Image (cartoon, grey):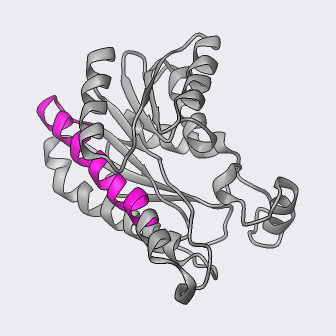
Amino acid sequence: MNRFTGKSVLVTGAGSGLGRAIALAFAAEGASVVAAGRTAATLDETVALIEAAGGTAAAVPADVTDSGRLEDLVRETVARFGGLDVAVNNAGILRGVAPVGDVSEEDWDAVQRTNVTGVWLAMKHEIAHMRRNGGGAIVNISSNLGAHLRIPNAAAYIASKAAVSALTRAAALDHIHEGVRINAVSPGAAAGPMSLRPGETDADRAERVKSENPLGRVAEAEEVAAAVLYLASPAAGSVVGTDLVIDSGSSA
C-alpha cells in the first residue's frame, strides 16, 4: 500500500518504541517523514532504518516543551518536504510512579508539561500551518491509562493522558471546519519501554498482561502504528475527534 505517497509526515518522539514504529510505517507507505525528538543519536537510527528500507526521512531534534522550537520544527518540515500533511504527537514521559500523596511537584510538573502542554503546543503550530494550506490530519498518542482505565500509583501519567484524550476531542471540534482532522489513539501495554513498570523486564510484562487483558498478550508497536495510519488516511475522512483504544480488551 502507498496511501501516503507524496505526503509529508511529522512524528514526535520518533527515536524509539512506538514513535519509531509509526515513522517506519508511514515511510513504508510512501511518506517523507520528519523524525523529531530530544536525542539526535536515536533519531539518526530511525532515519537510517527508514533509508535502508528505501524510504525518505530526516532527523530534526526538538523538545516538545519548547514552543519556539516546535514552531521551527514545523517550518523545517515544510522546508524539507514541501508541506505538512500529517502530524503524530507521540512524545511523552512516565515519571512520578507513586501514590498521589507521594508524587513530587517536580515529577508532576514534568509529566504534565511534556504529555499535555507538549501536545497542545505541537498542535498549535501544526494547526497554524495546516489551516493556511488546505488542512491536514493530526493523531495524538494518548493511553488507555487515562479516560479508559486506571491503576494504582500512576496518577501523574493517568491525569496527563486523560487530558490528552479530552484535548483531542476539543481541538477536533475547533478545527474540523478548517479542514484539520484530529483524532487520538490510546494504546494499552504496547511493546516498548513506556509500558514497563519499575523493575519489570519484557518477560515480566508478558506474564503480567496475560492476566490483565482478554487477549492475553502485549500489543506490538506495529499494530498501534497501523491504527495511526488508518486515522491519518483518507479512509478515515469522516472520523473526527475519536479516541481509538488498542489495549487487547483491558478497558472493555
Bounds of the magenta span? 111-136
Q: Position of residue 149 (x, y in %)?
A: 57, 75
Q: Residue at x 31, y 49 (%)?
A: 182
Question: Looking at the image, which is closer to me, 85 or 159?
Answer: 159
- Quadrant for residue 53, please give it: top right
Q: Position of residue 99 (x, y in %)?
A: 60, 85
Which image quadrant: the C terminus?
Answer: bottom right
Which image quadrant: the N terminus?
Answer: top right
Q: Is residue 83 visible?
A: no
Q: Residue at x 66, y 70 (%)?
A: 250
In this rendering, the answer to whether 117 lies above or below 33 is below
Q: Residue at x 50, y 42 (%)?
A: 13
Q: Residue at x 52, y 29 (%)?
A: 40
Report whether 218 appears left or right of 154: right
Report whether 214 appears left or right of 30: right
Taking the view exactly as shown, the residue that stands out farthest to the bottom is: 101
Q: Is residue 135 in the magenta section? A: yes
Q: Is residue 142 visible?
A: yes
Q: Position of residue 84 (x, y in %)?
A: 29, 28
In this rendering, the answer to whether 193 lies above or below 223 is below
Report whether 58 appears left or right of 79: right
Question: Looking at the image, which is closer to me, 236 or 13?
Answer: 13
- Quadrant for residue 117, please give it: bottom left
Q: Position of residue 206 (x, y in %)?
A: 83, 59
Report whether 210 appears left or right of 145: right
In this rendering, the answer to whether 251 lies above or below 185 is below
Magenta span dominant secondary structure: helix
